[in-house]
Amino acid sequence: MTPSRFLRCVSGVVFLLLLPADHPVRADDTSASESTNKVQAELKSAQKSLSELQKQEVLKLAAADVSAKRAADLEKQLADVQKRLAEEKKALAAVQQQKVTAEKQVAGIAARLKEHQDADQLVAVAQAVQQRLTAAQTQRSQLADEVAEVTRKIADQEQIAIQSDALLKKAKEDLPKVQEQLKKAREEFDAASLEFDKAKVAANSAGTADRELGRTLLTEEARRNSAGNAAARVAATIQSLEKSLQTLESSAKSAGVDAAEAGKNIAASIEIVRALHAKAAQVAASQATRLAEQQKQKAAAAEGLRKAQEHLQQQQQIYAEKSRAHFSLQLKVAELQNAEPLYDKRIADANALKEQLTTQQSEVSKRVEEQDAAVAVVEAEYVEKQQLAEAALEPLGRFVSFSRDVAPVFAKRCVACHNTRTAGGRLNMDSFAAVLRGGESGAAVDAHHAGDSLLVSMIEDGSMPKDADPLTKDEIARIRAWIDAGAPLDAGLTANAELFEIMPEMVQPLPPKTYRLPIPVTATAFSPDGGVLASSGYHEILLWNTKDGRLLRRITNVAERVYDLEFSADGQQLAAAAGTPGQLGEVKVFSVGDGAHLNTLVRTRDAVFAVAFSPDGKRIAAAGADRAVYVADVATGTQLQRIEDHADWVMDVNWSPDGKQLVSAGRDKTSKVFDAETGRSVITFNGHSEAVYCAAFLTDGKSVVSGGGDRQARVWTVADGKEARKIDGFGSDIFRIVVTPENHVLTASADRNAREHNLSDGKSVRTFAGHKDWVYTLSYNDSKKILATGSYDGEIRVW
């Protein structure tokens, strides 16, 4: 009730109370009793009190009006205040909500900070362990180097001992021969020495003769010169006398004297002197002739000396050679005579040092084994700590699993064009290490910078994969996140391992509940007791009761196509070779009892076509489209061998009866035999002209029968690879071969028939006709003497 309404009500009450006072007293009341007067007096008193009250009422009403006005003003103010209060409360609520949100955000950030800090702590722990691991690995590497060095030294000492022993034997064999050579060399040396002495004497004699003739020649030259000079002097005298005669005759003529008479004496002297000159000239000519003869003799002597000296040099050279040869053989004989103690000592020293080194090698090898164990412990600890760190980092976006998130994308979308054999752009992507190496355009991945990575650019612009659908947004996002996280590799994985080896095993799709159309039967196998027949399906293996044909079980979690099946010897396990072409190949082992997947023994990047248990059941062999033959331990799943010797798909593989050898069949038109323990190639059979699809050992283990696209089964010997027999009569390709204990061969052919031949003579025993399409597979059970065949049209027949 508001104040104004309250006043109106009060006024109404007052109005009702005043009504009696307005009515006059009647005349017949004048004689009222004292009681009445008393009442009237009370009335007056009451009326007086009422009047006072009415006055007070008026005052109070006035005061109430004032208060009402004030109240109205206050109500208005209150309404304004309440409005502001509501607004403030609303603002307060918003702030409080923001506060709650902020508190939650702070709490969330604090929690994330705690997660990051916890993750950082785990990373730090892992890094500390990694440092210990690196130190342990370094120490192990140093010890391994020490073992290698000691082993090398042991090999050196063994080689020294072997060489010394061989040299000693050779020395004993050579000594008589060399002594005989020495004897002959001595004879030749003595002969050469004698010839050398003779040559020296001859050279000395020739020298003496040459010197004597030289001296004689000098004398004769002096005589010739003296005679020549005398003749010249006489000639000069003649010229002087003739000149004097001319002068005298001229003077005589001038004087008128007889010139002949005047010059008679001079003319006579001239004649005498001319006679002397003629004699002197004769003497000079004779002397010149003698000198010429002496010169010839001197030239002959010089030539004889030259030849003697040349012969001497030759004999000296021969002497020197024979001397050296003789001396060398003397040394050789002495060496050979002293060889036995020398080489015995060398052998003893080498064996003693080898013994010391062997002891050292044993000690260091023991330390290596201890260090290997220590490294294994620390490595296991590191993997554990790193995996904890990765598990903490992954929700924070700081770690992306390569094996789980990225490798499957690469394997599915990239490896087909970028692998070891066909590296498009020289970029190989079949392993973590290969991806990081990059290609001809450089690094494909820039760790922590996805936007700058060539790989991301190419997959985002559609350049990769070439001629295929682009990667999905999710696949690209995973790759980007992985690169931004530093392109890490999961702890415990090997960088060089193929993608298929490190990818987590994917659960295969379920098979269809029912088949709308029959699918090809590509594999069959009997259990050892013949009670169960396994056959291939689409993403499944079917187990049938051979007695009534009832389906016993559908084994799932199998790759798309099953190519080969084989039961273990106890019938408890079933091995399946399967694959999704171009993407995945696998060999899985299942429990026959409940169909449970027990182990995956082989994983490859393409289909696996064949699988076979070893005779002792401890190993399996497998082969497939990656051109390799695998051997794995059934119990542990450890890969024992990977044999890469075929140039194309390996279509089949089987064991020898003793489990020591494997035979393979390849699309490269060859069948090969390998040592199962070492993987070494034993022999290659090149007789087929087309792809070889199947091969198996005969019961003796010394021969092999193989078949393929050339429509012939060929029997060949392992020892020399020669073809022993050829079996004809097939209308098309031979897909499967089984050798029975009776040494008969069963074959499945694309000509819609299965056949049995006697391998001893190649003659046909029986033809299993009735299929309407290619017979892809067959299996035989000796205990029940039953044969199962499977064809392309999905039909299985048991014979």
Image (cartoon, helix red, strand yellow):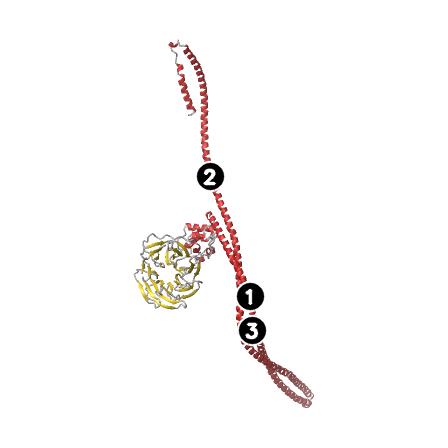
Q: Locate residue 647, reporting x and y percent.
A: 41, 62
Q: Nearer the viewer, residue 707 or 661?
A: 661
Q: Nearer the viewer, residue 737 or 232?
A: 737
The residue wearing badge 3 is 336
Sequence-first tag of 3 and 1: 3
Q: Residues within 10 Å of mark 2 (few under 14, many from 20)?
A: few
Element under label 1?
helix
Relative vertical location of residue 555 with respect to residue 242 in this rendering, above or below: above
Relative vertical location of residue 120 with respect to residue 370 in this rendering, above or below: above
Distance from Cα at disc 2 to Cα at disc 1: 85 Å
| Residue lying farthest to the top in this orientation | 31
Given contact means CB atoms under 8 Å apart, are the residues at marks 2 and 3 in contact? no
Q: Say which mark, if any, is on residue 352.
A: 1
- Closest to the camera, between mark 3 and mark 1, is 1
The residue wearing badge 2 is 100
Relative vertical location of residue 87 with respect to residue 698 in this rendering, above or below: above
Disc tally is: 3
Q: Is residue 765 rendered to the left or right of residue 629?
A: left
Quadrant of the frame with the C terminus: bottom left
Residue type at the position of mark 1: Ala
Visible residue check, residue 144: no
Element under label 3?
helix
